[in-house]
Amino acid sequence: EAGVTQFPSHSVIEKGQTVTLRCDPISGHDNLYWYRRVMGKEIKFLLHFVKESKQDESGMPNNRFLAERTGGTYSTLKVQPAELEDSGVYFCASSPREWRLAGLDTQYFGPGTRLTVL
Amino acid sequence: AQKVTQAQTEISVVEKEDVTLDCVYETRDTTYYLFWYKQPPSGELVFLIRRNSFDEQNEISGRYSWNFQKSTSSFNFTITASQVVDSAVYFCALSETIKAAGNKLTFGGGTRVLVKP
């Protein structure tokens, strides 16, 4: 079974440009999460999809970030326009849906996309 | 709000030594889950263990063991007889169960373990 994949693995852009990150979750996983780790800080939650619906986007830093999951399969995270403080590693994770076992939700992570904004 | 603290930022040991990683958490929830993930140099976060708040039994998996103590809000991780391949960053994480439809993780800052041959 293929794991969570992310593309690109590394992106270097200039301030003001747009970047789109992609995440392909494990096949059949309804839950998809985005996290990021900026330099020297903890990994922070950004948002959570259940299928194509945004369940929780409380961690999105501002309206320059737009996440989509059309069709409930892969997801994209667009940053427009990118700022210097957006540099960091963006992780995607997925988990199966278990309605009756609230909280029993092991998230499996991808390798991350390292974003550098110059 | 929930919080996870990993006080040790980096630990360096010589191969075959034991190493213990500390994790202390804060939560208002009575039902929650704790996790450990390993991040090897390749970058991905590898799931190691999940433990729910009702199960305080310690767990052993090969050279890995976990000590969950609810009374001190700690979930420590020990690597016995460390090997060079254990070199990685290890993250402790907490998930509350307020929502039924999947839960965000709160991570600690991570502990970098360097095992020297």
Image (cartoon, coloured by chain):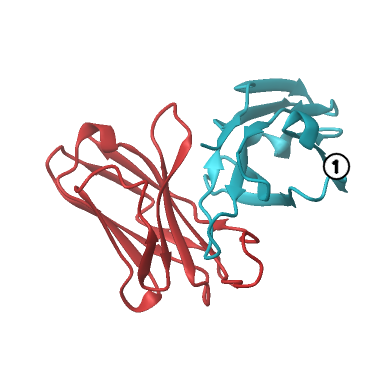
Chain colours: A red, B cyan
Q: Residues within 10 Å of mark 1 (few under 14, many from 20)?
A: few
Task: Name the residue tied to disc 1.
Answer: B63
**Residue B34 against residue A108 in the figure, above or below:** above
Q: Position of residue B41 (x, y in %)?
A: 56, 40
Q: Residue at x 76, y 28 (%)?
A: B72
Camera sees residue A15: yes
Subunit ID for the residue under disc 1: B
As drawn, the residue found furthest toward the left would be A16
Q: Residue at x 55, y 54 (%)?
A: B98
Look at label 1 and name its amino acid.
Arg
Helix or strand or loop: what does disc 1 sit on?
Answer: loop
The image quarter containing residue A49 is bottom left
Q: Position of residue A14 (x, y in %)?
A: 16, 39
Looking at the image, residue A31 sits to the left or right of residue B34; the answer is left
Camera sees residue B62: no
Q: Quadrant of the N terminus of chain A?
A: bottom right
Q: Could you say which is closer to the camera, residue A56 or residue A39?
A: A56
Q: Position of residue A92 (x, y in %)?
A: 45, 55
